[in-house]
Amino acid sequence: MTAATSTVFAALPIDETIAESNSQEIKVSLAARSYSVHVGAGLLAHTRLIAAHLPQPRVALVTNDVIWPLYGKALADALAAANIKVIPIILPDGESHKGWPALNMIFDALLEHACDRKTTLIALGGGVIGDITGFAAATYQRGVPFVQIPTTLLAQVDSSIGGKTAINHPRGKNMIGAFYQPQLVLADTDTLITLPDRELRAGLAEVIKYGLILDETFFDWLEKNLALLLARDPTALTRAITRSCEIKADVVANDERETAAEGGRALLNLGHTFGHAIETALGYGTWLHGEAVACGMLLATKFSHSLGQVDAATVTRTQQIFAAAGLPTVMPAISADDMLHHMGRDKKNDAGVIKLILLKSIGAAYVDATISADHIHAFLTAEPRLQTINA
Protein backbone atom coordinates (compact mmCIF):
# COMPACT_ATOMS: atom_id res chain seq x y z
CA MET A 1 0.00 0.00 0.00
CA THR A 2 1.15 3.51 -0.66
CA ALA A 3 2.03 5.90 2.13
CA ALA A 4 -0.90 8.09 1.18
CA THR A 5 -3.41 5.35 1.90
CA SER A 6 -1.74 3.21 4.55
CA THR A 7 -3.55 5.06 7.35
CA VAL A 8 -6.72 3.23 6.33
CA PHE A 9 -5.28 0.19 8.09
CA ALA A 10 -4.85 1.93 11.45
CA ALA A 11 -5.67 -0.37 14.34
CA LEU A 12 -9.33 -0.58 15.31
CA PRO A 13 -9.71 -0.16 19.08
CA ILE A 14 -11.06 -3.23 20.85
CA ASP A 15 -13.47 -2.31 23.59
CA GLU A 16 -16.35 -4.06 25.28
CA THR A 17 -18.70 -1.11 24.80
CA ILE A 18 -19.08 0.07 21.24
CA ALA A 19 -19.39 3.83 20.99
CA GLU A 20 -22.29 5.51 19.27
CA SER A 21 -21.54 6.41 15.64
CA ASN A 22 -23.26 8.41 12.93
CA SER A 23 -23.27 7.75 9.21
CA GLN A 24 -19.83 7.39 7.71
CA GLU A 25 -18.37 8.35 4.33
CA ILE A 26 -15.56 6.35 2.76
CA LYS A 27 -13.83 7.57 -0.39
CA VAL A 28 -12.84 5.16 -3.16
CA SER A 29 -9.97 7.09 -4.74
CA LEU A 30 -9.72 6.31 -8.46
CA ALA A 31 -8.86 9.69 -10.02
CA ALA A 32 -11.71 10.68 -12.34
CA ARG A 33 -13.66 7.57 -11.33
CA SER A 34 -13.57 8.32 -7.61
CA TYR A 35 -16.77 8.04 -5.60
CA SER A 36 -18.08 7.90 -2.04
CA VAL A 37 -19.54 5.06 -0.02
CA HIS A 38 -22.01 6.26 2.60
CA VAL A 39 -22.80 3.94 5.53
CA GLY A 40 -25.54 4.61 8.05
CA ALA A 41 -29.19 4.39 9.00
CA GLY A 42 -31.97 6.09 7.05
CA LEU A 43 -29.92 6.87 3.94
CA LEU A 44 -32.68 5.77 1.56
CA ALA A 45 -34.61 8.86 2.62
CA HIS A 46 -31.74 11.13 1.54
CA THR A 47 -32.67 11.41 -2.13
CA ARG A 48 -30.51 14.53 -2.40
CA LEU A 49 -27.45 12.27 -2.24
CA ILE A 50 -28.71 10.43 -5.31
CA ALA A 51 -29.94 13.54 -7.12
CA ALA A 52 -26.50 15.14 -6.85
CA HIS A 53 -25.09 12.39 -9.11
CA LEU A 54 -27.74 12.41 -11.84
CA PRO A 55 -26.88 14.00 -15.21
CA GLN A 56 -30.62 14.28 -15.85
CA PRO A 57 -33.69 13.82 -13.61
CA ARG A 58 -34.44 10.33 -14.96
CA VAL A 59 -33.45 6.94 -13.55
CA ALA A 60 -34.10 3.27 -14.14
CA LEU A 61 -34.57 1.61 -10.77
CA VAL A 62 -33.49 -2.04 -11.00
CA THR A 63 -34.55 -4.26 -8.13
CA ASN A 64 -36.20 -7.64 -7.55
CA ASP A 65 -39.64 -8.86 -6.58
CA VAL A 66 -38.64 -9.24 -2.92
CA ILE A 67 -37.03 -5.82 -2.44
CA TRP A 68 -39.59 -3.83 -4.47
CA PRO A 69 -42.39 -4.02 -1.87
CA LEU A 70 -39.96 -3.57 1.03
CA TYR A 71 -37.95 -0.58 -0.22
CA GLY A 72 -38.30 -0.14 -3.98
CA LYS A 73 -41.75 1.44 -4.12
CA ALA A 74 -40.90 3.86 -1.29
CA LEU A 75 -37.65 4.89 -3.00
CA ALA A 76 -39.43 5.35 -6.34
CA ASP A 77 -42.04 7.55 -4.66
CA ALA A 78 -39.37 9.60 -2.88
CA LEU A 79 -37.47 10.15 -6.13
CA ALA A 80 -40.68 11.09 -7.92
CA ALA A 81 -41.44 13.60 -5.16
CA ALA A 82 -38.05 15.15 -5.95
CA ASN A 83 -39.15 15.54 -9.59
CA ILE A 84 -37.06 12.59 -10.80
CA LYS A 85 -38.74 10.33 -13.34
CA VAL A 86 -38.43 6.67 -12.32
CA ILE A 87 -38.60 3.62 -14.59
CA PRO A 88 -39.00 0.55 -12.34
CA ILE A 89 -37.39 -2.68 -13.58
CA ILE A 90 -38.30 -5.59 -11.30
CA LEU A 91 -36.34 -8.81 -11.81
CA PRO A 92 -36.94 -12.24 -10.27
CA ASP A 93 -35.01 -12.84 -7.06
CA GLY A 94 -32.08 -15.20 -6.68
CA GLU A 95 -28.61 -16.17 -7.90
CA SER A 96 -30.16 -18.55 -10.44
CA HIS A 97 -31.48 -15.49 -12.32
CA LYS A 98 -28.07 -13.81 -12.66
CA GLY A 99 -27.80 -14.48 -16.38
CA TRP A 100 -28.70 -13.41 -19.89
CA PRO A 101 -32.53 -13.51 -19.54
CA ALA A 102 -32.56 -11.09 -16.59
CA LEU A 103 -29.93 -8.89 -18.25
CA ASN A 104 -32.12 -8.67 -21.36
CA MET A 105 -35.08 -7.70 -19.19
CA ILE A 106 -33.08 -4.60 -18.21
CA PHE A 107 -32.08 -3.85 -21.80
CA ASP A 108 -35.66 -4.35 -23.02
CA ALA A 109 -37.00 -1.85 -20.50
CA LEU A 110 -34.28 0.71 -21.27
CA LEU A 111 -34.94 0.48 -25.00
CA GLU A 112 -38.73 0.52 -24.56
CA HIS A 113 -38.44 3.83 -22.68
CA ALA A 114 -35.85 5.24 -25.12
CA CYS A 115 -33.31 5.67 -22.33
CA ASP A 116 -30.19 7.54 -23.40
CA ARG A 117 -26.64 7.79 -22.05
CA LYS A 118 -27.70 10.25 -19.35
CA THR A 119 -30.23 7.87 -17.82
CA THR A 120 -28.79 6.59 -14.52
CA LEU A 121 -29.35 3.00 -13.47
CA ILE A 122 -29.93 2.47 -9.75
CA ALA A 123 -29.22 -1.00 -8.36
CA LEU A 124 -31.40 -1.60 -5.29
CA GLY A 125 -30.83 -5.04 -3.82
CA GLY A 126 -28.17 -7.59 -3.01
CA GLY A 127 -25.10 -8.69 -4.89
CA VAL A 128 -27.03 -10.25 -7.78
CA ILE A 129 -28.89 -7.02 -8.51
CA GLY A 130 -25.75 -4.93 -8.09
CA ASP A 131 -23.66 -7.12 -10.38
CA ILE A 132 -26.22 -7.47 -13.15
CA THR A 133 -27.24 -3.79 -13.04
CA GLY A 134 -23.60 -2.71 -13.12
CA PHE A 135 -22.96 -4.93 -16.15
CA ALA A 136 -26.05 -3.50 -17.87
CA ALA A 137 -24.77 0.02 -17.13
CA ALA A 138 -21.32 -0.84 -18.48
CA THR A 139 -22.68 -2.15 -21.76
CA TYR A 140 -25.90 -0.24 -22.52
CA GLN A 141 -24.99 2.30 -25.22
CA ARG A 142 -21.36 1.59 -24.24
CA GLY A 143 -21.80 2.95 -20.75
CA VAL A 144 -24.31 4.86 -18.64
CA PRO A 145 -24.04 6.08 -15.01
CA PHE A 146 -25.18 3.85 -12.17
CA VAL A 147 -25.65 4.04 -8.42
CA GLN A 148 -25.35 1.14 -5.98
CA ILE A 149 -27.84 0.89 -3.10
CA PRO A 150 -27.02 -2.49 -1.53
CA THR A 151 -29.65 -3.99 0.80
CA THR A 152 -27.77 -7.08 2.04
CA LEU A 153 -24.78 -7.20 4.35
CA LEU A 154 -22.68 -9.03 1.77
CA ALA A 155 -23.40 -6.42 -0.89
CA GLN A 156 -22.79 -3.52 1.51
CA VAL A 157 -19.32 -4.72 2.51
CA ASP A 158 -18.16 -6.30 -0.74
CA SER A 159 -19.89 -6.52 -4.10
CA SER A 160 -21.19 -2.94 -4.29
CA ILE A 161 -17.67 -1.51 -4.01
CA GLY A 162 -14.91 -1.76 -6.58
CA GLY A 163 -16.65 -1.91 -9.93
CA LYS A 164 -16.70 -5.65 -10.59
CA THR A 165 -19.88 -6.33 -12.58
CA ALA A 166 -20.92 -9.61 -14.14
CA ILE A 167 -23.41 -12.33 -14.91
CA ASN A 168 -22.94 -16.04 -14.39
CA HIS A 169 -22.44 -18.71 -17.03
CA PRO A 170 -23.43 -22.36 -16.47
CA ARG A 171 -19.72 -23.23 -16.64
CA GLY A 172 -18.48 -20.56 -14.24
CA LYS A 173 -19.52 -17.83 -11.82
CA ASN A 174 -19.11 -14.18 -12.89
CA MET A 175 -17.36 -15.24 -16.10
CA ILE A 176 -18.99 -12.56 -18.28
CA GLY A 177 -18.58 -9.01 -17.03
CA ALA A 178 -16.67 -5.75 -16.90
CA PHE A 179 -14.91 -3.39 -14.52
CA TYR A 180 -17.27 -0.43 -14.22
CA GLN A 181 -17.35 1.89 -11.23
CA PRO A 182 -20.56 3.35 -9.76
CA GLN A 183 -21.09 7.05 -9.16
CA LEU A 184 -22.14 6.47 -5.56
CA VAL A 185 -22.78 3.72 -3.02
CA LEU A 186 -25.45 4.14 -0.33
CA ALA A 187 -25.36 1.41 2.33
CA ASP A 188 -28.47 1.99 4.46
CA THR A 189 -28.09 -0.22 7.53
CA ASP A 190 -31.85 -0.04 8.15
CA THR A 191 -32.36 -2.42 5.22
CA LEU A 192 -30.64 -5.14 7.24
CA ILE A 193 -33.61 -5.23 9.63
CA THR A 194 -35.61 -7.27 7.11
CA LEU A 195 -32.68 -9.37 5.93
CA PRO A 196 -33.25 -13.10 6.54
CA ASP A 197 -30.94 -14.63 9.14
CA ARG A 198 -29.30 -16.87 6.55
CA GLU A 199 -28.46 -13.85 4.38
CA LEU A 200 -27.04 -11.99 7.38
CA ARG A 201 -24.77 -14.90 8.23
CA ALA A 202 -23.65 -15.14 4.60
CA GLY A 203 -22.71 -11.46 4.68
CA LEU A 204 -20.67 -11.96 7.83
CA ALA A 205 -18.43 -14.33 5.85
CA GLU A 206 -17.18 -11.42 3.76
CA VAL A 207 -16.77 -9.23 6.86
CA ILE A 208 -14.64 -11.92 8.51
CA LYS A 209 -12.63 -12.17 5.30
CA TYR A 210 -11.28 -8.64 5.72
CA GLY A 211 -9.86 -9.49 9.11
CA LEU A 212 -8.31 -12.70 7.81
CA ILE A 213 -6.58 -11.10 4.84
CA LEU A 214 -5.42 -7.70 6.09
CA ASP A 215 -6.38 -6.73 9.63
CA GLU A 216 -5.78 -9.04 12.58
CA THR A 217 -7.03 -6.38 15.00
CA PHE A 218 -10.35 -6.30 13.16
CA PHE A 219 -10.50 -10.10 13.32
CA ASP A 220 -9.96 -9.93 17.09
CA TRP A 221 -12.78 -7.37 17.33
CA LEU A 222 -15.09 -9.60 15.30
CA GLU A 223 -14.42 -12.56 17.61
CA LYS A 224 -15.38 -10.41 20.61
CA ASN A 225 -18.44 -8.79 19.00
CA LEU A 226 -19.89 -11.54 16.80
CA ALA A 227 -22.91 -12.02 19.07
CA LEU A 228 -23.78 -8.33 18.73
CA LEU A 229 -23.52 -8.56 14.94
CA LEU A 230 -25.76 -11.63 14.83
CA ALA A 231 -28.25 -9.77 17.05
CA ARG A 232 -28.14 -6.89 14.50
CA ASP A 233 -26.92 -4.34 16.98
CA PRO A 234 -26.99 -1.20 14.79
CA THR A 235 -23.81 0.35 16.18
CA ALA A 236 -21.83 -2.87 15.85
CA LEU A 237 -23.10 -3.40 12.30
CA THR A 238 -22.24 0.14 11.26
CA ARG A 239 -18.76 -0.26 12.67
CA ALA A 240 -18.17 -3.63 10.97
CA ILE A 241 -19.53 -2.40 7.63
CA THR A 242 -17.50 0.81 7.76
CA ARG A 243 -14.26 -1.00 8.56
CA SER A 244 -14.87 -3.53 5.80
CA CYS A 245 -15.56 -0.75 3.30
CA GLU A 246 -12.41 1.12 4.37
CA ILE A 247 -10.27 -1.93 3.72
CA LYS A 248 -11.87 -2.71 0.37
CA ALA A 249 -11.72 0.93 -0.76
CA ASP A 250 -8.00 1.07 -0.04
CA VAL A 251 -7.29 -2.20 -1.86
CA VAL A 252 -9.32 -1.15 -4.91
CA ALA A 253 -7.66 2.27 -5.02
CA ASN A 254 -4.26 0.58 -5.23
CA ASP A 255 -5.19 -2.20 -7.68
CA GLU A 256 -8.46 -1.42 -9.45
CA ARG A 257 -8.27 -4.14 -12.10
CA GLU A 258 -6.48 -6.83 -10.13
CA THR A 259 -3.24 -6.49 -12.08
CA ALA A 260 -0.74 -6.13 -9.21
CA ALA A 261 2.12 -8.61 -9.46
CA GLU A 262 2.07 -9.31 -5.72
CA GLY A 263 -1.13 -9.52 -3.71
CA GLY A 264 -3.23 -6.43 -4.36
CA ARG A 265 -6.88 -6.91 -5.17
CA ALA A 266 -6.44 -10.65 -5.64
CA LEU A 267 -6.19 -10.97 -1.85
CA LEU A 268 -9.90 -10.12 -1.65
CA ASN A 269 -10.52 -13.54 -3.20
CA LEU A 270 -9.43 -15.54 -0.16
CA GLY A 271 -11.53 -18.72 -0.27
CA HIS A 272 -13.20 -17.77 -3.53
CA THR A 273 -11.40 -20.28 -5.74
CA PHE A 274 -12.76 -23.08 -3.57
CA GLY A 275 -16.05 -21.23 -2.94
CA HIS A 276 -16.88 -20.50 -6.57
CA ALA A 277 -16.22 -24.14 -7.41
CA ILE A 278 -18.71 -25.16 -4.71
CA GLU A 279 -21.34 -22.74 -6.03
CA THR A 280 -20.94 -23.88 -9.62
CA ALA A 281 -20.86 -27.59 -8.81
CA LEU A 282 -23.96 -27.43 -6.61
CA GLY A 283 -25.89 -25.10 -8.92
CA TYR A 284 -26.19 -21.36 -8.32
CA GLY A 285 -28.29 -20.54 -5.28
CA THR A 286 -28.07 -23.96 -3.57
CA TRP A 287 -25.51 -22.49 -1.21
CA LEU A 288 -25.40 -18.73 -0.83
CA HIS A 289 -22.22 -17.03 -2.00
CA GLY A 290 -21.16 -16.20 1.55
CA GLU A 291 -21.75 -19.77 2.69
CA ALA A 292 -19.60 -21.18 -0.11
CA VAL A 293 -16.87 -18.59 0.49
CA ALA A 294 -16.84 -19.27 4.24
CA CYS A 295 -16.24 -22.95 3.55
CA GLY A 296 -13.66 -21.93 0.95
CA MET A 297 -11.81 -19.68 3.39
CA LEU A 298 -11.60 -22.46 5.94
CA LEU A 299 -10.29 -24.79 3.21
CA ALA A 300 -7.69 -22.15 2.28
CA THR A 301 -6.66 -21.85 5.94
CA LYS A 302 -6.36 -25.63 6.27
CA PHE A 303 -4.35 -25.78 3.05
CA SER A 304 -2.08 -23.03 4.39
CA HIS A 305 -1.57 -25.16 7.50
CA SER A 306 -0.71 -28.18 5.36
CA LEU A 307 2.03 -26.08 3.76
CA GLY A 308 3.40 -25.05 7.15
CA GLN A 309 2.34 -21.40 6.71
CA VAL A 310 -0.06 -21.17 9.69
CA ASP A 311 -0.31 -23.12 12.91
CA ALA A 312 -3.13 -25.35 14.11
CA ALA A 313 -4.39 -22.61 16.43
CA THR A 314 -5.07 -20.38 13.41
CA VAL A 315 -7.13 -23.13 11.80
CA THR A 316 -9.07 -23.57 15.04
CA ARG A 317 -9.78 -19.85 15.39
CA THR A 318 -10.92 -19.63 11.78
CA GLN A 319 -13.17 -22.67 12.13
CA GLN A 320 -14.62 -21.41 15.39
CA ILE A 321 -15.56 -17.96 14.11
CA PHE A 322 -17.32 -19.39 11.04
CA ALA A 323 -19.11 -21.97 13.18
CA ALA A 324 -20.17 -19.27 15.65
CA ALA A 325 -21.53 -17.24 12.73
CA GLY A 326 -23.62 -20.24 11.65
CA LEU A 327 -21.66 -20.78 8.43
CA PRO A 328 -20.59 -24.08 6.83
CA THR A 329 -17.30 -25.53 8.04
CA VAL A 330 -17.47 -28.83 6.13
CA MET A 331 -17.44 -29.29 2.36
CA PRO A 332 -20.60 -30.38 0.57
CA ALA A 333 -20.72 -33.76 -1.13
CA ILE A 334 -18.68 -32.80 -4.21
CA SER A 335 -15.88 -35.01 -5.47
CA ALA A 336 -12.31 -33.79 -5.63
CA ASP A 337 -12.43 -34.31 -9.41
CA ASP A 338 -15.45 -32.00 -9.76
CA MET A 339 -13.96 -29.39 -7.45
CA LEU A 340 -10.68 -29.37 -9.35
CA HIS A 341 -12.52 -29.16 -12.68
CA HIS A 342 -14.37 -26.01 -11.63
CA MET A 343 -11.33 -24.52 -9.89
CA GLY A 344 -9.47 -24.89 -13.18
CA ARG A 345 -11.90 -22.41 -14.76
CA ASP A 346 -11.35 -19.70 -12.14
CA LYS A 347 -10.74 -16.19 -13.52
CA LYS A 348 -7.57 -15.73 -11.45
CA ASN A 349 -5.82 -18.63 -13.13
CA ASP A 350 -2.95 -17.94 -15.50
CA ALA A 351 -1.96 -20.29 -18.34
CA GLY A 352 -3.82 -23.15 -16.73
CA VAL A 353 -2.18 -22.72 -13.32
CA ILE A 354 -4.59 -22.52 -10.38
CA LYS A 355 -3.90 -19.49 -8.20
CA LEU A 356 -4.80 -19.83 -4.54
CA ILE A 357 -5.10 -17.05 -1.97
CA LEU A 358 -3.60 -18.42 1.23
CA LEU A 359 -2.59 -17.19 4.69
CA LYS A 360 0.76 -16.61 6.35
CA SER A 361 -1.10 -15.58 9.49
CA ILE A 362 -4.38 -13.96 10.43
CA GLY A 363 -4.18 -10.54 8.79
CA ALA A 364 -1.57 -11.56 6.22
CA ALA A 365 -2.74 -13.20 2.99
CA TYR A 366 -0.70 -13.99 -0.12
CA VAL A 367 -1.10 -15.39 -3.63
CA ASP A 368 0.39 -18.80 -4.43
CA ALA A 369 0.54 -20.07 -8.02
CA THR A 370 3.08 -22.83 -7.33
CA ILE A 371 0.73 -25.56 -6.10
CA SER A 372 0.21 -28.49 -8.46
CA ALA A 373 -3.25 -29.75 -9.36
CA ASP A 374 -2.30 -33.14 -7.93
CA HIS A 375 -1.45 -31.54 -4.58
CA ILE A 376 -4.82 -29.72 -4.48
CA HIS A 377 -6.62 -32.91 -5.50
CA ALA A 378 -4.98 -34.89 -2.70
CA PHE A 379 -5.91 -32.21 -0.16
CA LEU A 380 -9.55 -32.13 -1.31
CA THR A 381 -9.79 -35.91 -1.34
CA ALA A 382 -8.79 -36.02 2.33
CA GLU A 383 -11.31 -33.38 3.43
CA PRO A 384 -14.51 -34.60 5.15
CA ARG A 385 -17.82 -34.10 3.34
CA LEU A 386 -21.38 -33.35 4.43
CA GLN A 387 -23.83 -36.16 3.87
CA THR A 388 -26.24 -33.72 2.19
CA ILE A 389 -25.65 -30.51 0.24
CA ASN A 390 -27.71 -28.33 2.57
CA ALA A 391 -25.81 -25.43 4.13
Image (tube, rainbow, N blue to C red):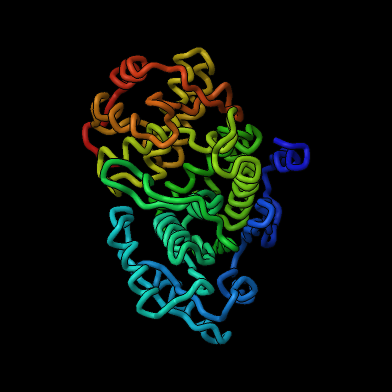
Q: Position of residue 337 (x, y in %)?
A: 24, 24
Q: Position of residue 282 (x, y in %)?
A: 25, 40
Q: Position of residue 129 (x, y in %)?
A: 41, 60
Q: Quadrant of residue 108?
A: bottom left
Looking at the image, residue 10 sits to the left or right of residue 202; the answer is: right
Q: Nearer the viewer, residue 264 or 335?
A: 264
Q: Quadrant of residue 365?
A: top right
Q: Nearer the viewer, residue 277 or 22?
A: 277
Q: Is residue 231 visible?
A: no
Q: In the figure, 365 relative to 133: above or below?
A: above
The quarter of the picture where the N terminus appears is top right
Q: Position of residue 77 (x, y in %)?
A: 49, 83
Q: Is residue 380 visible?
A: yes
Residue at position x 27%, y 61% in the image? 101
Looking at the image, residue 233 sits to the left or right of residue 138; the answer is: right
Q: Number of callouts in the render?
A: 0
Residue at position x 65%, y 73% in the image? 52
Looking at the image, residue 50 sits to the left or right of residue 335; the answer is: right
Residue at position x 45%, y 74% in the image? 60
The quarter of the picture where the C terminus appears is top left
Q: In the figure, 48 relative to 373: above or below?
A: below
Residue lying furthest front: 142
Q: In the figure, 25 relative to 105: above or below?
A: above
Residue at position x 54%, y 83% in the image? 84
Q: Nearer the viewer, residue 269 or 239?
A: 269
